[in-house]
């Protein structure tokens, strides 16, 4: 009976997700759009999935490019050095870097090329220069903020003060909170807040942040070439699905699942201190959409959106996806990096480098 109630809760969450997606879609999309029309029985090519994409008036937000680049203060007037510590997945690390550039501009500080968090789980030691073109970055942000590859020699042996703002939820002012410490210690390692609103920054800091995000980051050549190879070899057109049903993500979510013994063993090996929620807490967590969808639930939603079963789907994810056969039983054209890249080339892609390809 407990399993039945749990199954009903999962189904209810998936149905609600599908209903919400459909309601938003029907309200926001033009009435004459046929993006999700089902193909006819005699022409199961899925053409309607790709045709009649709505012509919108979306334009890039380029307000920050409309005036001349701001001049940085003279080097002698800099207030200190900030080393940005970037954590999480690649997208979160990119967010931390962009926020760090805005903060450096705000505090009139010099940025040292950021530290990327290493991942023991993925055996990943990728640094900033292993993913992004450091020379291009240094040249691009010139005159917005001052960036160095390394600390000056006279400061390199000093132990920097670490300041973690990552989980600070309440509003705070970087100038009031951080600048005094920067002036006191000269060098700080900063983990920026993930929740502070950047619209409180002055325009110069907001523009520096935007420039760092959208104009200064370019993949290193070898990763770009690998991405181009994947794009050439994938059957076109295709859908990209970021299916995060992996042992580490499931363990991190602390959600309950009724999976095979092999899948549960993979999850328990990386669970660590994150034990499964109690029934009431897990139910609340799942209602908030915090539990990764299983491949079977994902197939249900794709079917609800009338995605044809013959649609090629590229799985943008790391290795170790669990219960994938439950998606493949409905959507048979599933592709991963291993389908197109040589084993040696694939072996070199770990953690953030693998994510960068996607």
Image (cartoon, rainbow, N blue to C red):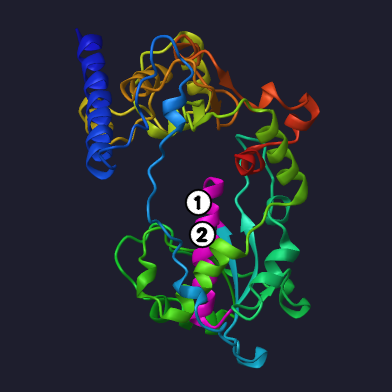
- Percent coordinates x, y for residue 310 in the rendering: 49, 15
Determine whether 297 is above or below 172 in the image: above
Residue 311: give its label: none
Q: Please name the predominant secondary structure of the magenta segment in the image.
A: helix
User: Which residue carries the number 2 mark?
Assistant: 96
Q: In which quarter of the image is the N terminus?
A: top left
- Percent coordinates x, y for residue 315 in the rendering: 54, 27
Tell me what residue is drawn at x 28 percent, y 34 percent.
21
Q: What stretch is highlighted in magenta?
A: 86-109
Q: In which quarter of the image is the C terminus?
A: top right
Query: Between 155 and 74, which is closer to the camera in this rendering?
Result: 74
- Percent coordinates x, y for residue 42 in the rendering: 43, 9
Q: Is residue 97 magenta?
A: yes
Tell me what residue is drawn at x 32 percent, y 60 percent.
169
- Percent coordinates x, y for residue 325 in the rendering: 50, 11
Image check: 305 left or right of 119?
A: left
User: Which residue carries the number 1 mark?
Assistant: 92
Kindly report the distance in space between the C-alpha atoms of the residues bearing marks 2 and 1: 6 Å
């Amino acid at each position: 009976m407990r399993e039945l109630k749990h199954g009903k809760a999962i189904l209810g969450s998936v149905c609600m997700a599908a209903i919400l997606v459909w309601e938003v879609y029907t309200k926001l999309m033009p009435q004459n759009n046929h993006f999700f029309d089902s193909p006819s029985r005699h022409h199961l090519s899925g053409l309607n999935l790709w045709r009649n994409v709505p012509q919108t008036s979306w334009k890039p937000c380029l307000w920050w490019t409309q005036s001349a680049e701001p001049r940085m203060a003279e080097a002698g007037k800099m207030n200190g050095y900030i080393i940005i510590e970037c954590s999480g997945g690649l997208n979160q690390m990119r967010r931390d870097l962009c926020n760090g550039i805005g903060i450096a501009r705000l505090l009139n500080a010099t940025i040292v090329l950021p530290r990327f968090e290493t991942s023991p789980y993925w055996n990943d030691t990728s640094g900033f220069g292993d993913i992004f073109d450091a020379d291009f970055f240094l040249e691009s942000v010139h005159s917005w903020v001052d960036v160095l590859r390394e600390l000056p020699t006279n400061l390199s042996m000093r132990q920097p003060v670490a300041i973690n703002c990552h989980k600070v939820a309440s509003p705070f002012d970087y100038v009031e909170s951080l600048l005094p410490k920067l002036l006191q210690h000269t060098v700080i390692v900063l983990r920026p807040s993930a929740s502070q609103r950047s619209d409180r920054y002055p325009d110069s800091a907001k523009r520096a942040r935007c420039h760092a995000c959208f104009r200064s980051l370019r993949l290193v050549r070898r990763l770009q070439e690998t991405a181009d190879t994947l794009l050439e070899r994938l059957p076109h057109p295709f859908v990209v699905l970021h299916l995060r049903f992996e042992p580490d993500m499931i363990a991190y979510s602390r959600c309950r699942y009724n999976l095979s013994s092999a899948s549960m063993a993979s999850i328990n090996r990386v669970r660590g201190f994150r034990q499964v929620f109690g029934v009431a807490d897990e139910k609340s967590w799942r209602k908030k959409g915090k539990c990764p969808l299983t491949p079977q639930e994902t197939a249900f939603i794709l079917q609800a959106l009338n995605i044809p079963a013959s649609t090629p789907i590229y799985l943008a994810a790391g290795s170790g996806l669990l219960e994938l056969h439950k998606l493949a039983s409905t959507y048979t054209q599933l592709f991963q990096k291993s389908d197109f890249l040589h084993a040696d080339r694939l072996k070199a892609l770990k953690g953030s480098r693998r994510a960068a390809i996607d």
